[in-house]
Image (cartoon, rainbow, N blue to C red):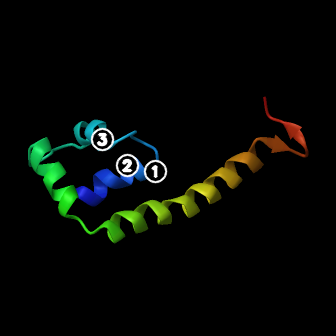
C-alpha cells in the first residue's frame, strides 16, 4: 500500500500522501497507521521510487512533444 501511494506522489498524480490515500479503492488502515508505516519505510526505498520515476516521465514527455507536430506543423 505504501509503495502504491508513494508512486502516485512521485509521479505527480497526487501532491502528497494525504490526498493520495482517498484515491485508493480500499484503504485497509487509518491515515495515522499509514503515516506510521511510511515513517518506518526505509528512506532508500522511497528515494529510489522517486528517482526512478523520472525516466519513464522523460520518455513520455519526449513522445508527447514529438506527437504535437506533423511534418513540422503544429496539430492545434
Residue assigned mark 2:
8
Residue assigned mark 3:
20
Between 67 and 4, the one lying in front of the other is: 4
Residue assigned mark 1:
11
36 versus 30 height, above or below: below
Between 15 and 60, the one lying in front of the other is: 15
Q: Residues within 10 Å of mark 2 (few under 14, many from 20)?
A: some
Between 74 and 62, the one lying in front of the other is: 62
Question: Could you tell me which residue is drawn at 80 percent across and 34 percent down?
Answer: 75
Instruction: Tell which circle, 2 or 3, labels the residue nearer the N-terminal end.
Output: 2
73 versus 52 height, above or below: above
Helix, strand or loop at label 3? It is helix
Instruction: Report x, y in % for residue 41.
Output: 23, 65
Query: What separation in Å lies between label 2 and label 1 (alpha carbons)?
Result: 5 Å
Give the position of the N terminus as an image quadrant: bottom left
Q: Residues within 10 Å of mark 3 (few under 14, many from 20)?
A: some
Amino acid at each position: 500500500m505504501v509503495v502504491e501511494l508513494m508512486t502516485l506522489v512521485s509521479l505527480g498524480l497526487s501532491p502528497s500522501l494525504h490526498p493520495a490515500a482517498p484515491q485508493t479503492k480500499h484503504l485497509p488502515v487509518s491515515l495515522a497507521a499509514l503515516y506510521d508505516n511510511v515513517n518506518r519505510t526505509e528512506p532508500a526505498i522511497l528515494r529510489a521510487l522517486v528517482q526512478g520515476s523520472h525516466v519513464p516521465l522523460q520518455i513520455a514527455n519526449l513522445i508527447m512533444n514529438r506527437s504535437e507536430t506533423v511534418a513540422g506543423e503544429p496539430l492545434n
